[in-house]
């Protein structure tokens, strides 16, 4: 089963292909995607890589987390599903709150 990784603090010039190339050195990459703003298509500074093998994903995390890639010190860890992520204190979900 494939393992999805979260990659944070990416350079705003990082592309899907450069991300895939970086992780390909550790095993088979199923997909690599830099998150972009839907209006401007500019990078949001994070992305996701899906690796075919859990062992290869663990090797990539150990080797790349905290290392510099394209001028930035990146964060690499296992991606969590939306349900597993902690919610903010005010439960803000992008809408306006009345006071």
Image (cartoon, rainbow, N blue to C red):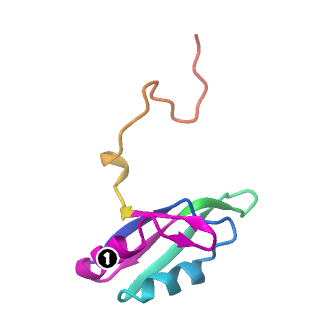
User: What span is in magenta?
Assistant: 47-76
Residue located beneath label 1 in the image: 57
Please provide percent x and percent y for residue 18.
58, 82
Q: Quadrant of residue 81?
A: bottom left
Residue 70 pos. (x, y %): 62, 74
Which quadrant of the rendered structure holds the C terminus? top right
Does the magenta segment cover residue 4?
A: no
Q: What residue is at 36 percent from the left and 60 percent from the top? A: 79
The residue shown at (32%, 46%) is 83
Q: Is residue 40 above or below residue 13?
A: above
What x and y, as percent, mark residue 57? 31, 76
In magenta segment, residue 70: yes
Q: Residue at x 35, y 39 (%)?
A: 86
- Residue at coordinates 76% horizontally, 59% vertically from top-left? 40
Q: Position of residue 32 (x, y in %)?
A: 49, 77
Report which quarter residue 98 is drawn in.
Answer: top right
Instruction: Pick whichever, 48 or 72, lies toward us.
Output: 72
């Amino acid at each position: 089963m494939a393992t999805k990784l979260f990659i944070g603090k990416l350079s705003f010039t990082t592309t899907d292909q450069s991300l895939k190339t970086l992780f390909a050195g550790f095993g088979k990459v199923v997909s690599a995607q830099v998150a972009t703003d839907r209006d401007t298509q500019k990078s949001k500074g994070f992305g996701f890589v899906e690796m075919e093998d859990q062992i290869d994903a663990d090797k990539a995390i150990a080797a790349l987390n905290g290392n510099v890639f394209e001028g930035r010190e990146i964060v690499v860890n296992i991606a969590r599903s939306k349900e597993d992520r902690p919610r903010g204190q005010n439960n803000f979900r992008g809408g306006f709150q009345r006071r």
